[in-house]
Amino acid sequence: MSRLELKNICKNFDDFIASKDISFVAEEGEMVTLLGPSGCGKTTLLKMIGGFHTPDSGEILIGDENITNVSPEKRNTSMCFQSLRAIPSLER
């Protein structure tokens, strides 16, 4: 994996501000944790990195490539959801 950089990422859902001006760099080989209370935008940020949501503004770069508008299947990223809701038959 290459360097991951987020530049001034913003995402709104109607009147709700999910992410506001988020910027950070994760260098190759680093481990990064997103920590915060429920509803603070952690999952939204991960979905934007994975391409499942598009930021309203800002850029997402992997290495030197701007992947902000690249579809999920064309990114070299993955996402593991915390809940099994995507597969209801596996819920307990």
Image (cartoon, rainbow, N blue to C red):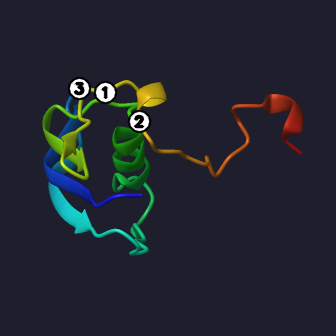
For the C terminus, give its image quadrant. Answer: top right
**Front-lying residue, 84 or 2:** 2
Question: Against 74, is 91 above or below?
Answer: below
Residue on which disc 2 sits: 75
Q: Position of residue 64 (x, y in %)?
A: 18, 48
Q: Three-letter amino acid code at disc 3? A: Asp
Q: Vertically, is 32 above or below 78? A: below
Real-space Cα separation, disc 1 to disc 3, in angstroms: 23 Å
Question: Under tag 3, what secondary structure?
Answer: loop
Q: For marks 1 and 2, give the CA distance.
A: 7 Å
The residue at the point 29 percent across, 70 percent down is 27
Task: Give the camera-side residue of 72 and 91.
Answer: 72
Asked which quadrant contains residue 85, the reply is: top right
Give the x, y percent position of residue 43: 44, 49
* Residue linked to disc 1: 70
In-image side of 26 versus 34 (left or right): left
- Contact, CB < 8 Å: mark 1 with mark 2? yes
Q: Do the residues labelled 3 and 2 touch (CB within 8 Å)?
A: no
Q: Residue 22 occupies which quadrant of the picture?
A: bottom left
Which disc is residue 14 wearing? Answer: 3
* Residue 38 x %, y %: 45, 58
Q: How crowded is the residue under tag 3: few (<14 C-alpha within 10 Å), some, or many (20+)?
A: few
